[in-house]
Structure formats: structure tokens, C-alpha cells
Image (cartoon, rainbow, N blue to C red):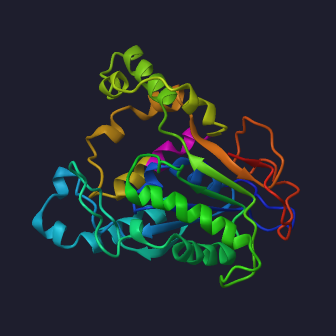
């Protein structure tokens, strides 16, 4: 994983990727190996974390103490600092409060002042200002379902997509010079095809698969596979991804699901992190292996119609 030539745009500036996430730890569980790969290639990467994770659970039994519950906000901030350093990324907080994951039937109302209840235009404008300042060529976020139906993840999608529009709109009431993001992607790594491949690899190695029960309740869905457009080879960076995830010590059990498949098995069975190209201002051919595909001739001041949109 040695440093290679810096990747630049048509103006000679470093390529830039903005990854917008709902909570601290999401940046390490979704797209972290991709991010680490691009950092090694000289790409500037900015993680924007929408909330502080204040209402998250403590999922590591070794960290489940009254003292840690009382200091959860500070702990999650410190964990984000550690993960940021491991991945080599820049990071900014959007400044909203975690909504929590409501449980029950019927679901209880969301707490006042939380991210999921924020005005999308207002939050989108705040994020758009960061986009105008950082000027990302590529933005990653979650799909319309949030990847999974956590209210903050769904809101993350809405706010990010609104911010992309506002950042490019010269008439928008947003601080900074308009900036047209060239490409927008949805994280799609946790899909059934990948789980099937990892499950089969575990059986081939005579190991107990953590995917067996999940797959039994996970029906085949051809429409999900059809959404996959981009497969970034990044298995050399899986160890960094795991180190970053372990840095979020309150959020992951080091002996739990996330680390149940040996790295060597993962690297061989599914060596990519996967995405859906949702919008693009540049022409590209699908499937892709690079989030920056088609950007060789991208001009920073160019404002095109979307070529590709789902």
C-alpha cells in the first residue's frame, strides 16, 4: 500500500471525494476501504458526519459500563478522531443530534430537535456550503431507503441530494461559489450477492458462516443486483477498514459479526466495495471500477445537465 502518483483533475488539482455519513462509525463500516485506497492515491477525502451519535447504543459488551453511557457523546467524538487518523481523511461535523433508532409497534415519535426532523432545505444548505468550500468531484451517500431504515440514514440521503442541487445553483442562498458535483454514488456494499459469496467461501474453508441465518430470511431480489454499477477493487485496504471500525470501540464487538469472516477469505471471495452511480455530469461506461471514471476531462467550472440519473 505504498504511495503512488497523485491523482488530479483536468486543472491539475487533487481529485476530491466527500463521503456524507449519518453517525460516527458509518464512515468505517461503509466504503472505508475505498476511502483508504483513494487516500493512498493522493485523493483528498472529506468525511461529513451529520450527527454526533449521541443516542447510539453501546454494542461492545466490554464497553458497556455506566461510566461509558454517561460519556457517550465524548467517547464517540474521540472514536471518530481515531478512525479519521487511521483512514487518513479530513472530517467535519454537520452539527445535528442523533435521532436514535425507534423501537416498538407502533413506533414512538422521534425526539424533538433530532436530525431526522430537521428541515431538509436548511440542512441541505448547510451541507451545500461545505460542498462549495471543499469542491468534491464525487459525493457518496445512502440510497432512498438509507441502506437500512434508520431515520438518520434516510434523512442523510434526502439532505445530501438536496445539498448537491443547492451547491450547483447560482441562485441558492448558500455561502460560497457554486460548485457542480460531477458524480453522486450510493453505498451498496451490503447486498445479497456479496453475502452469498462470503457464505460459500466460509463453507469451502470449513468455517461456520455468520451469513447462514441472514440468507435464509433474505429473499433474492434481482432489482437490487441491477442497481449495482460500480465495483471498486480495494481488498488490500480491508485491514485498514477493520482497524478504523475497531476504533469505534463502543459500537463494535471485536469478537462479533463484523470480524467473523477472516480477512483472507473476504479478500478472495469479494475484493470490492460496491456502489450505485445515481447521478453523473460526465460520460462514463458501466460497469465501473473507479468512482472517478470519466473525470479525466472534467472542468471544475462546468455546469452540465445530469447525463445519468436514477
> Residue, x 19% and y 58% (percent of image)?
63
Q: Quadrant of the C terminus?
A: top right
In the rendered image, the residue lying farthest to the front is 106
Quadrant of the rendered image containing residue 161: bottom right
Q: Position of residue 141 (x, y in %)?
A: 56, 55
Q: Residue at x 71, y 53 (%)?
A: 4
Q: Residue at x 74, y 73 (%)?
A: 169
Magenta-highlighted residues: 233-241
| Residue that appears at 43% across and 18% down | 200
In the rendered image, residue 162, in percent from the top left (x then y), is placed at: 61, 66
Left or right of 65 on screen, residue 36:
right
- Residue 260 included in the magenta stretch of the image: no
Q: Which of the two residues, 69 or 255, is positioned nearer the viewer here?
A: 69
Main SS of the magenta part reads helix
Question: Compared with residue 275, is residue 81 higher up or lower down, i.e. above or below?
Answer: below
Q: Is residue 88 visible?
A: no
Is residue 21 positioned above or below 264 on the image? below
Position of residue 129 measured from the top left corner of the image (x, y, whole percent): 62, 78
Residue placed most toward the observer, 280 or 247? 280
Amino acid at each position: 500500500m505504498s504511495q503512488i502518483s497523485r491523482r488530479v483533475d483536468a486543472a491539475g488539482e487533487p481529485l476530491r471525494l466527500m463521503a456524507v455519513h449519518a453517525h460516527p462509525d458509518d464512515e468505517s463500516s461503509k466504503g472505508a476501504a475505498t476511502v483508504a485506497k483513494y487516500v493512498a492515491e493522493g485523493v483528498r477525502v472529506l468525511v461529513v458526519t451529520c450527527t454526533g451519535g449521541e443516542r447510539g447504543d453501546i454494542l461492545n459488551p466490554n464497553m458497556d459500563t455506566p461510566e461509558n453511557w454517561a460519556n457517550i457523546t465524548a467517547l464517540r467524538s474521540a472514536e471518530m478522531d481515531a478512525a479519521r487518523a487511521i483512514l487518513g481523511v479530513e472530517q467535519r461535523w454537520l452539527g445535528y443530534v442523533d435521532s436514535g433508532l425507534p423501537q416498538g409497534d407502533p413506533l414512538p415519535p422521534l425526539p424533538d430537535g433530532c436530525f431526522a426532523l430537521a428541515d431538509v432545505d436548511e440542512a441541505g444548505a448547510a451541507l451545500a456550503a461545505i460542498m462549495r468550500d471543499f469542491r468534491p468531484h464525487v459525493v457518496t451517500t445512502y440510497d432512498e431507503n438509507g441502506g437500512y431504515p434508520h431515520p438518520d440514514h434516510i434523512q442523510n440521503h434526502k439532505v445530501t441530494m438536496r445539498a448537491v442541487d443547492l451547491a450547483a445553483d447560482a441562485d441558492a442562498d448558500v455561502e460560497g461559489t457554486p460548485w457542480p458535483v460531477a458524480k453522486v454514488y450510493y453505498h451498496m456494499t451490503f447486498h445479497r450477492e456479496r453475502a452469498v459469496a462470503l457464505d460459500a467461501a466460509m463453507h469451502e474453508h470449513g468455517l461456520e458462516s455468520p451469513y447462514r441465518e441472514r440468507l435464509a430470511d433474505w429473499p433474492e431480489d434481482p432489482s437490487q443486483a441491477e442497481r449495482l454499477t460500480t465495483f471498486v477493487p480495494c481488498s488490500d485496504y480491508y485491514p485498514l477498514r477493520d482497524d478504523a471500525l475497531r476504533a469505534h470501540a463502543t459500537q463494535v464487538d471485536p469478537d462479533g459479526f463484523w470480524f467473523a469472516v477472516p480477512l483472507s477469505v473476504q479478500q478472495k471471495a469479494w475484493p470490492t466495495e460496491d456502489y450505485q452511480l445515481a447521478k453523473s455530469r460526465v460520460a462514463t461506461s458501466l460497469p465501473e471500477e473507479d468512482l472517478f471514471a470519466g473525470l479525466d476531462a472534467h472542468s471544475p467550472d462546468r455546469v452540465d445537465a445530469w447525463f445519468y440519473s436514477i
